[in-house]
Amino acid sequence: MEGSRFRRLEAPTVFTHTPPNVARTQKVVLDADAIQRSVRRIAVAILEATSGIEDLTLVGIRRGGVALAARIAKEIEVVEGRPPPVGTVDISLYRDDAATALPNPKIGPSDIPFDVSGRHVVLVDDVLHTGRTVRAAIECLQDHGRPARVWLAALCDRGGRELPIAPDFVGRTIEVDTGRLDVWIDAAGPDRVVLTEGE
């Protein structure tokens, strides 16, 4: 009614999905101390399985596995007095969606400054999920030689495998139905693993 002091109320907005300005749920599932304990356990397990470091090498999968491989090497050095050789692999050209994936300028090339032939190679990644990244890393590694054996170490196994790939050494198994696991090691702020849900 014109001139009335009463105003008609609009119906409230109903969201059928999570609006972009609503914060998603985040939870720290591993703090710095828990990560360090996991890294130490992985390092000890690797030494027990490979009987020392004479033929042992670590290869981190870019990007998440690089810092983790360096951490594991430091823990092995504490026990053995010297670290094993550490390299990195870039799987960009080995992905099963390489033809459609956009190049990532933040990811550097593979760097394996040693012969992997006849050696025990531990591939290292931060999060194991579908298994497709590991498959690509193995293919890349084989272009550098023929290892005696390839092992797999992961800080977190979140399940959801699409290929028959399992870790030989794992820090923590964290079931994630939906959402994302982000690992922060040697980054700004403390080391942590964060579970983001609601995506």
Image (cartoon, rainbow, N blue to C red):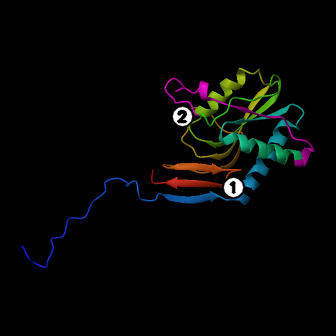
x%, y% of residue 161?
56, 38
Please tell me which of labels 2 and 1 falls first in the chain: 2
What's the mark number on residue 191? 1
Q: Is residue 143 above or below residue 184?
A: above
x%, y% of residue 121?
78, 31
Name the residue that disc number 2 marks: 162
Amino acid on which the number 1 mark rests in the picture: Asp
The number of numbered discs placed on residues in the rendered structure image is 2
Write the start and end of the magenta stretch as one range: 78-104
Q: Is residue 102 above or below residue 182?
A: above
Amino acid on which the number 2 mark rests in the picture: Glu
Select label 2 or label 1 by which is in front.
1
x%, y% of residue 131?
59, 35
Q: Is 19 or 78 nearer to us in this picture?
A: 19
x%, y% of residue 194?
59, 55
Q: Is residue 81 magenta?
A: yes
Point 69% across, 50% down: residue: 185
**Main SS type for the magenta part?**
loop
Residue 164 appearing in the image? no
Q: Quadrant of residue 117?
A: top right
Q: Quadrant of residue 113?
A: top right
Q: Is residue 25 above or below residue 55?
A: below
Point 45% across, 54% down: residue: 198
